[in-house]
Amino acid sequence: MFKDAKYKMSEERLQELKDELHFLQTVREKEVAEQIKEARSFGDLTENSEYDEAKTEQGKLYSKIAEIRNLIENAEIVYASDRTDSVGIGSKVTVHDVEFGTDDTYEIVGSQEADPAMGRISDDSPIGRGLMDRRKGDIVEVNAPAGVLRFKILNIA
């Protein structure tokens, strides 16, 4: 990961990360330490699968802690846009797919909160980038992995 990379997220997401980090550093770290202690009591560590599993779990835990710390340290708080004249972070955008004739609504969010299955797309995604700063009525062409997509912006809330 880039050292100077910024991760866009809401204050709520930042708090969720801080809460998760606290849990991992207190509760989960103690649980893993206890697993290692218990596995050591089984004797010879060279053939002790419980010990190996506990150490692997510890490695995963420390990796997750480092990842969350990085996200917290490089968080860039973004605030939902109050504007409805053009698309910004926090906007709910209803678009019409010109090729398929279907309508979809997307909420534009920071990359740490994206959940495409729930209609929450990152401002860094191809569709998100294509919609940013556009207005109602605009036809937007987006270069996506599936090819060029064309949308008409029907509504911005």
Image: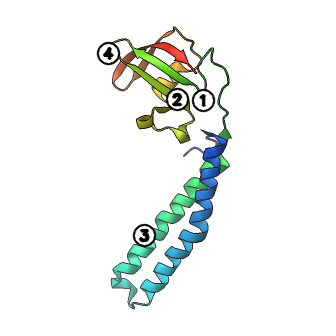
**Picture quadrant where residue 80 is located:** top right
Residue at the spot 59% in from the left edge and 64% down from the top edge: 23
Horizontal and vertical percent for residue 111? 54, 37
Q: Earlier in the sequence, mark 4 or mark 2?
A: 4
Q: Earlier in the sequence, mark 4 or mark 3?
A: 3
**What is the three-letter code of the residue carrying label 4?**
Phe
Horizontal and vertical percent for residue 112? 55, 42
User: Rounded to the nearest whole Å, what is the CA distance between mark 3 and mark 1?
Assistant: 39 Å
Circle 3 sits on which residue?
56
Horizontal and vertical percent for residue 108? 54, 29
Q: Is residue 87 placed above or below 139 in the rendered structure?
A: below
Q: Earlier in the sequence, mark 2 or mark 1?
A: 1
Check disc 3: other Cα within 10 Å, few if <14, some if 14-19, many if 20+.
few
Check disc 4: other Cα within 10 Å, few if <14, some if 14-19, many if 20+.
few
Q: Earlier in the sequence, mark 1 or mark 4?
A: 1
- What number is the disc on residue 107? 2
**What is the three-letter code of the residue carrying label 3?**
Thr
- What number is the disc on residue 147? none
Check disc 1: other Cα within 10 Å, few if <14, some if 14-19, many if 20+.
many
Tell me: 12 left or right of 34.
right
User: Rounded to the nearest whole Å, what is the CA distance between mark 2 and mark 1?
Assistant: 6 Å
Secondary structure under badge 2?
Answer: strand
